[in-house]
Image (tube, grey):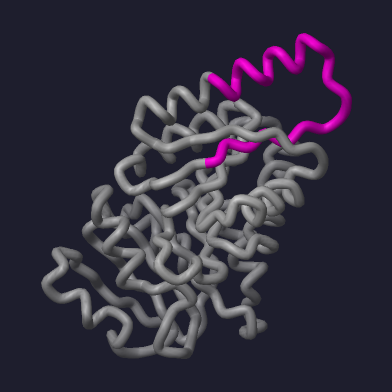
Amino acid sequence: MKLLYTTNRKDSDPSYGLKETLLILKDVGFREVVYLQTTPGDERLKDLSGTGITYGILVEETLSLQRILNTASKESVSLVIADFDRAIQKPSRSFLIRGLIRKTSVPVLVLNNIPAQGDSLFEHIIFPTDWSPASEKALAYLLGFSAIIKRLDIVNVINGKLTVRDIRELKEKLIRTRKTCLSEKIDAESHVYAGSIPEETIKASEDYKATLIILGISSKKPFYKRIFRKNLSFRIAMAAAVPVLIVP
């Protein structure tokens, strides 16, 4: 499989160790990288020799959302990694991330802060779910990484009062999802939070010292519902202190 790693960083190092990230993803089939950058040269990638990862470099003076989308489509990538500098104003990091979430047809990994020293990207995942088709699709995608996931916390955020029946159904769904993950040899636990989905998802990532958040968004619901869910994903991606992987 092939991924697109896109960045407008001018410094020599991305926000998360590029080589380490690519080596982790290689273990689940990503062996080809297209690197779309604003800095000439291959300083970030030259140490990939001998790793079995092949790469190509495309250079743009300024990254545009359309250029990223066109490259992802032309190269038939299966994942976009977005590593944008917060200090660059035009186009802004928020504009690029919002556009990718709304328009890409493949998962987008938004890099935020570096996980704790010694932890890998897939060391400890937070998976927020409401058991919608979008969440179930994200779960299926997540299970494809089972070989490199060390720990998973399944989180459901409730809003409003629940009846006894609601509580029983919620418990059954959490048990079922946890069993699915355990069957794939993923060390999984489940938790219930209450309140705002973005705020509580981020709180869970802090409570359990996560290294990554994975969530799904729907592309088949009515327009206003799609925009709502994508806005939630955008808010989580922008506010989280860890990388966020968004599955369309």
Horizontal side of residue 194 vs 51, given as left or right:
right
**Residue at image point 59% right, 31% down:** 220
Instruction: Tell me: residue 113, above or below residue 230.
Output: below
Residue 102 in sight in this render: no
- Residue drawn at 31 percent across, 64 percent down: 22
Left/right placement of residue 242 relative to residue 36 reads: right
Where residue 87 sits in the image (x, y, percent)? 64, 85
Up-down: is 65 above or below 42? above
**Residue nearest the observer in this picture, 234 or 170:** 170
Q: Residue at x 36, y 72 (%)?
A: 18
The outermost residue toward the right is 161
Q: Nearer the viewer, residue 160 or 53?
A: 160
Number of numbered discs visible in the structure rendering = 0
Q: Nearer the viewer, residue 187 or 194?
A: 187
Q: From the viewer's perspective, is 144 left or right of 128? A: left
| Residue 61 percent location from the top left of the image | 46, 86
Residue 42 location in percent, x, y? 28, 85
- In the image, taking residue 197 as reference, residue 240 lies left or right, namely left
Outermost residue, left direction? 50
Q: Which residues are magenta?
A: 153-175
As displayed, is residue 218 above or below residue 74?
above
Residue in view at x 65 percent, y 76 percent: 92
The stretch drawn in magenta includes residue 168: yes
Q: Is residue 245 magenta?
A: no
Taking depth in this image into account, of 126 and 62 the one nearest to the observer is 126
| 100, above or below 178, in the image | below
Q: Is residue 112 visible?
A: yes
Q: In the picture, residue 26 is in which quadrant? A: bottom left
Measuring from the top left, give residue 126's x and y in whole percent: 56, 46
